[in-house]
């Protein structure tokens, strides 16, 4: 089908939907004029779905958009339909193959009944469940704080990347950077974690392999701060721990780049060079302004291990900083859950399982338990398969039931990527049966699935 012909059909569909809404404002639902326009829209949609599988439409700046192309020259009926979607807070909708006429009728009735009142995502799901609407998916404009929180978290994360990058570049040039910017971004991260921990943790799952050194440093800072927050430490202690996490790898600036980036296994001699970076990091931090000595000590000790079997080797009677293991555990978790050329990729859940086996040896078992409690059974970023055969990524924890987190559905039951990822709370039940709407069956490897988990936080 030619593009112009396709766009013409979509205009006819939305014109018919707008006509149905207009008639519903004048006549009862079962009136022939209402039924006629709904039937017309239904016939057009189902005909188009025979070749498209799904029809996705978006509303951008009060303009109808199909596959990225705005559709202008709108009729009054079409404009009414767009306006009705906007008044309900719906910014996109998708019609799926298998759509029933009764679903379309119920959808039009919902639009008509809720014009002028923004529908939350939760309310849409409840209404769709009651009316048994399964082949229409809508994306709503959430009016709570989460979108703003995620935007703020992204800005803080990017600022932290910039701070680490600038500090490491200065050190490579032989300069000792000021620690003021590092402390500032850590304070910002701490504030964001208090406001919306899930938004901040979600960003640690977006792995930039080309800038691994910098993203890893920020992730360790975020995770270290999260652990420190859960321990109810003083504000100054938390900031010192966060700074240590953010700057834990600055000593690697004193190691040859080809060793840091080497994709294969290091030789014994090469590993001995790498093992110098905690001492080098400590040396640098104690010279930086605005950085407390405890942060430098934590950096020196982050590879020593709970059982002191790591490096650097210490003299008898040496007393470790009590919170060094916080950064060690954050460092371990992010490294395990990041795909690298020299290691098997692990899901967040698998990473925690590996760390549980390390507890009591190189890792503090009490701190490992704290991390598991924070991240839940299914940590944020874990890709899961649901009992509906949909694939989703965990977006937030549920305090009521850690086995039922909030997720973002990325693919449908047939494995097709959704045009608009759908936010689901697995704690929700069918109001008619009292049974859970969806449940997690298993975790899945994102490399083996036709889905991109980063779409959920992009």
Image (cartoon, helix red, strand yellow):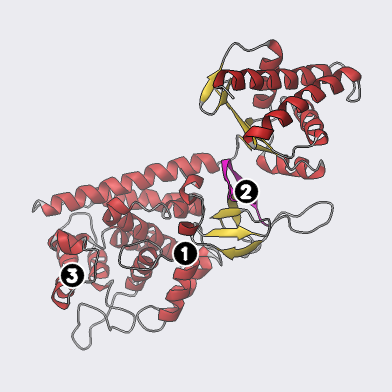
| Structural crowding at the residue carrying mark 3, measured as other residues with C-alpha within 10 Å and reported as few (<14), some (14–19) or many (≥20) | some
Task: Evaluate if marks 3 and 2 touch, with contact meaning CB atoms under 8 Å apart.
Answer: no
Residue occupied by mark 2:
412
65 left or right of 238 in image: right
Q: CA distance from mark 3 to mark 2?
A: 45 Å
Magenta stretch contains residue 426: yes
User: Could you say whether the residue bearing mark 1 is in a helix, strand or loop?
Assistant: loop
Which residue range is magenta in the image? 409-427
At a point 44% along the width and 75% down the height, the residue shown is 354
Residue 202 seen in render: yes
Q: Toward the viewer: 432 or 158? A: 432
Pointer 3 or 2: first along the chain: 3
Camera-nearest label, 3 or 2: 2
Main SS of residues in magenta: strand
Q: Which mark, by number, is residue 180?
A: none
3D distance between C-alphas at marks 3 and 1: 26 Å
Which residue is label 1 attached to? 347
């Amino acid at each position: 089908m030619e593009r112009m012909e396709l766009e013409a059909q979509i205009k006819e569909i939305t014109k018919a939907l707008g006509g149905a809404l207009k008639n519903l404002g004048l006549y009862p639902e079962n009136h022939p004029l209402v039924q006629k326009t709904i039937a017309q829209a239904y016939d057009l949609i189902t005909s188009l779905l025979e070749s498209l599988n799904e029809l996705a439409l978006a509303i951008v700046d009060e303009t109808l958009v199909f596959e990225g192309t705005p559709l202008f020259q709108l009729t009054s009926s079409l404009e009414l339909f767009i306006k009705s979607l906007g008044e309900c807070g719906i910014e996109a909708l998708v019609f799926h193959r298998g759509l029933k006429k009764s679903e379309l009728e119920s959808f039009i009735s919902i639009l008509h009944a809720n014009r002028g009142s923004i529908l939350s995502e939760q309310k849409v799901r409840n209404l769709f469940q009651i009316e048994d609407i399964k082949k229409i998916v809508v994306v709503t404009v959430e009016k709570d704080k989460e979108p703003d929180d995620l935007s703020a978290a992204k800005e803080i994360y990017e600022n932290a990347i910039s701070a680490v990058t600038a500090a490491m570049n200065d050190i490579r040039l032989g300069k000792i950077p000021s620690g003021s910017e590092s402390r500032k971004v850590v304070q910002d991260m701490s504030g964001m974690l208090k406001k919306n921990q899930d938004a901040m943790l979600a960003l640690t799952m977006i792995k930039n392999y080309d800038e691994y050194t910098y993203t890893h440093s920020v992730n360790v800072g975020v995770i270290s701060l999260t652990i420190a927050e859960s321990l109810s430490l003083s504000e100054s202690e938390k900031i010192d721990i966060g700074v240590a996490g953010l700057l834990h790898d600055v000593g690697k600036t004193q190691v040859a780049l080809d060793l840091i980036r080497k994709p294969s296994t290091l030789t014994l001699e090469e590993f001995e060079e790498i093992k110098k970076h905690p001492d080098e990091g400590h040396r640098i931090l104690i010279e930086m302004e605005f950085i407390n000595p405890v942060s430098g000590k934590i950096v020196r000790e982050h590879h020593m291990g709970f059982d002191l079997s790591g490096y650097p080797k210490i003299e008898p009677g040496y007393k470790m900083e009590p919170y060094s293991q916080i950064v060690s555990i954050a460092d371990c978790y992010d490294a395990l859950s990041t795909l690298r050329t020299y290691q098997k990729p692990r899901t967040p859940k698998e990473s925690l399982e590996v760390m549980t086996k390390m507890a009591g040896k190189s890792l503090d078992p009490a701190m490992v338990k704290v991390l598991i409690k924070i991240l839940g059974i299914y940590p944020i970023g874990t890709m899961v398969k649901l009992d509906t055969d949909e694939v989703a990524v965990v977006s937030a924890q549920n305090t009521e039931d850690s086995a039922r987190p909030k997720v973002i559905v990325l693919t449908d039951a047939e494995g097709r990527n959704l045009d608009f990822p759908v936010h689901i709370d697995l704690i929700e039940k069918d109001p008619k049966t009292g049974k859970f709407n969806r449940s997690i069956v298993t975790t899945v490897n994102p490399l083996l699935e036709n889905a991109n988990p980063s779409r959920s936080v992009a």
